[in-house]
């Protein structure tokens, strides 16, 4: 299947990456090259194959559902581009 | 006396224990080498004050006796590792100014063992690349050149800065990470040793994520013994990474007996590529002979799904990257784009990510978004995961048949010139990982060992692939190969 300009625009939107209108055809072309390469996977018979989940079968460890390292508001906010009054600040979300 | 920065980790350890030198002297020697090597663009954030402080503490610990092997050893740390209070930006503009408030488990393990951090090393942006050309810091440069030709060559990628720094003796060893070959390919391009351990050996906590089911950290060093020593210190069980395994870490250096008699080495026929340079083929043949001469049994094997590894990887890795990189939203850390009047939160996300991510990262995030989008998830992502299971089964089958390790070339070529691949389509660049990527998909340990030079004098590497959790055995086979190959060449200093 081939990706057109409209699909490229939709993917960019889903990925939340601004792509200028005039860059879309080249982007669609690159997607098609990569997806063409990936198409080879259709040659493989995967009937009845379970997707791989780990190198050696093992049960994921569990832990108590408790706060382990809480109370670090300053550290959490230290790298924020815009932090105010103990919160992350963003442009207005609700009209 | 040899320049201290040119010592191996094992030599430096022994000299420190014997009181023949100090960590401070070793560290000063490396810092001077780093300052005279800006042309390599390997170290992108230098931390001399921290290094000298750590060296001083290491010297005190050594004087007190009973210091670990890595105590006082100056290392470089790939920029992908979060290091407390020190810039850690995965070579991306989107993380400019980010200073982690915590330390990655692997770097903490190294510091607990007394290692000294000289600074942060260049890499491809978010570890996405095979030539270190996607870095926001500019290209790292290979210390090796083609004879007298002064064309700047790639050190490989994504751990290009680590490879360049170790090959040029700017540090005694460096951390790398390997998602599709990012330790082994640059190691091969620069004539050094690099091992990616079994998935789960090293904690991924605090390593900026690319593709979580494939990412593993590992050491990049001047020889196999150093890899054993450094890997030992990097591995641990970590409750903060649910995929980190709770297995004991064996003594890897003790595994280097030099005896591989009775071992079976598999040669996979699918790794013979059309158009592969004769020199790579010849090197591979010599590698087989060396292991046979050492008493191993060399057998032909088949790994039938090999050709599907790269396409499976280029579904799985971008898919996981698109999820992992969703966190770069201009809110919690790093850069936020300047907004126009009336811009809302969606414009903030879109502009921040367009400005902050480089072209290759944007492309992979979008490919990942596409293969995970409604209607395509089964056709692409789930199919790739099933093919991945078949690739792993290929390896399981040969190991079950008695093969102990697999010998392959590390890369399909020697280091290429920076900029030479600019016009190629992305898939051409991806082919660099054709021999290494199967190992990540199957979660196995793999090591690249320098084994010779091509006719232009550039280093070439061989790869050994081991059984899961058998890094000790793998390192020992690599040690035999290293000794037989006798690779001692160093790049002539031009920088």
Image (cartoon, coloured by chain):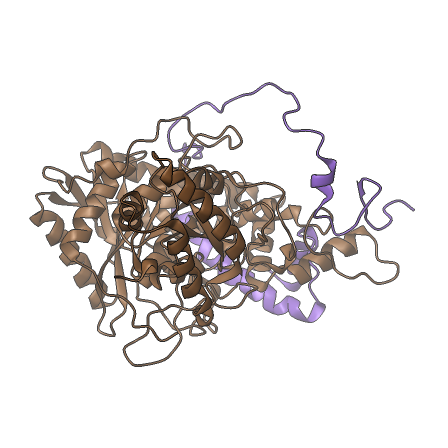
Chain colours: A purple, B brown
Asked where in the image residue B2 lies, by quadrant, the reply is bottom left
Q: Which of A32 and B365 is in front in this view?
A: B365
Q: In which quarter of the image is the N terminus of chain B?
A: bottom left
Q: Which residue is drawn at 46% across and 22% down?
A: A59
> Above or below — where is B202 with respect to B152?
above
x then y, percent, for residue B69: 33, 40
x then y, percent, for residue A67: 66, 24
Q: Nearer the viewer, residue B382 or B119?
A: B119
Furthest-right residue in this view = A95
Q: From this viewpoint, is residue B428 visible?
A: no
Furthest-top residue in this view = A64
Q: Quadrant of the C terminus of chain B?
A: bottom left
Q: From this viewpoint, is residue A92 visible?
A: yes
Furthest-bottom residue in this view = B149
Q: Which residue is drawn at 36% across and 58% down?
A: B166
Query: Left or right: where does residue B298 sit relative to residue B103?
Result: left
Query: Left or right: where does residue B192 sit relative to residue A75?
Result: left
Q: Residue at x 23, y 63 (%)?
A: B280
Q: Nearer the viewer, residue B455 or B90?
A: B90
x then y, percent, for residue A3: 59, 60
Asked where in the image residue A5 lies, by quadrant, the reply is bottom right
The number of callouts visible is 0
Q: Which residue is drawn at 56% across and 50% down?
A: B368
> Above or below — where is B169 with respect to B376?
below
Query: Left or right: where does residue B287 sit relative to residue B223?
Result: left
x then y, percent, for residue B488: 21, 61
Query: Left or right: where does residue A17 sit relative to residue B248?
Result: right
């Amino acid at each position: 299947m081939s990706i057109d300009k409209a699909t490229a625009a939709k993917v960019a939107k889903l990925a939340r990456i601004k792509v200028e209108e005039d860059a879309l055809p080249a982007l669609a072309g690159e997607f098609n090259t990569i997806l063409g390469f990936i198409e080879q996977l259709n040659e493989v018979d995967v009937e009845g194959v379970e997707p791989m989940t780990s190198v050696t079968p093992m049960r994921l460890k569990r832990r108590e559902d408790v706060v382990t390292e809480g109370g670090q508001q300053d550290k959490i906010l230290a790298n924020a581009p815009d932090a105010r009054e103990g919160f992350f600040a963003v442009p207005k979300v609700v009209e | 006396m040899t320049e201290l920065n040119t010592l191996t980790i094992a030599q430096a350890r022994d000299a420190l224990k014997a009181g023949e030198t100090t960590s401070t002297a070793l560290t000063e020697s490396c810092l001077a080498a780093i300052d005279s090597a800006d042309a390599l663009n390997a170290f992108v954030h230098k931390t001399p004050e921290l290094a000298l402080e750590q060296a001083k503490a290491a010297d005190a610990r050594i004087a007190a006796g009973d210091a670990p092997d890595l105590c006082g050893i100056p290392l470089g740390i790939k920029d992908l590792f979060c290091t407390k209070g020190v810039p850690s930006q995965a070579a991306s503009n989107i993380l400019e100014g980010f200073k982690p408030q915590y330390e990655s488990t692997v770097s903490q393990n190294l510091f607990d063992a007394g290692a000294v951090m000289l600074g942060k090393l260049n890499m491809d942006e978010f570890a996405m690349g095979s030539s270190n050309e996607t870095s926001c810091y500019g290209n790292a440069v290979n210390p090796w050149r083609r004879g007298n030709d002064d064309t700047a060559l790639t050190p490989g990628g994504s751990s290009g800065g680590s490879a360049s720094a170790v090959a040029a003796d700017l540090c005694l060893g460096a951390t790398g990470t390997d998602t599709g070959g990012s330790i082994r390919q640059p190691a091969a391009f620069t004539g050094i040793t690099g091992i990616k351990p079994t998935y789960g050996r090293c904690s991924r906590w605090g390593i900026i994520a690319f593709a979580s089911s494939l990412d593993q950290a590992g050491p990049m060093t001047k020889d196999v013994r150093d890899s054993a020593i450094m890997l030992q210190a990097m591995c641990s069980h970590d409750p903060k990474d649910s995929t980190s395994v709770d297995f004991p870490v064996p003594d890897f250096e003790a595994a280097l007996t030099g005896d591989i008699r009775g071992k079976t080495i598999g040669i996979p026929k699918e790794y013979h590529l059309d158009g592969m340079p004769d020199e790579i083929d010849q090197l591979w043949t010599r590698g087989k002979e060396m292991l046979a001469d050492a008493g191993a049994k060399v057998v032909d094997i088949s790994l039938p799904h090999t050709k599907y590894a790269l396409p499976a990887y280029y579904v799985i890795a971008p898919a996981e990257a698109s999820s992992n990189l969703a966190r770069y939203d201009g809110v919690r850390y790093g850069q936020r784009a300047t907004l126009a009047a009336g811009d809302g939160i969606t414009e903030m996300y879109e502009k921040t990510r367009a400005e902050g991510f480089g072209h290759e990262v944007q492309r992979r995030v979008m490919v990942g978004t596409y293969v995970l989008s409604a209607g395509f998830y089964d056709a692409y992502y789930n199919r790739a995961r099933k093919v991945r299971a078949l690739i792993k089964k290929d390896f399981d089958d040969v190991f079950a048949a008695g093969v102990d390790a697999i010998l392959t070339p590390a890369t399909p070529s020697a280091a290429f010139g920076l900029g030479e691949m600019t016009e190629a389509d992305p898939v051409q660049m991806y082919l660099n990982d054709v021999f290494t990527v199967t190992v990540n998909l199957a979660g196995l340990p793999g090591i690249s060992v320098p084994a010779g030079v091509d006719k232009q004098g550039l280093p070439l590497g061989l790869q050994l692939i081991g059984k899961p959790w058998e890094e000790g055995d793998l390192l020992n086979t690599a040690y035999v190969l290293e000794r037989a190959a006798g690779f001692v060449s160093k790049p002539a200093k031009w920088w």
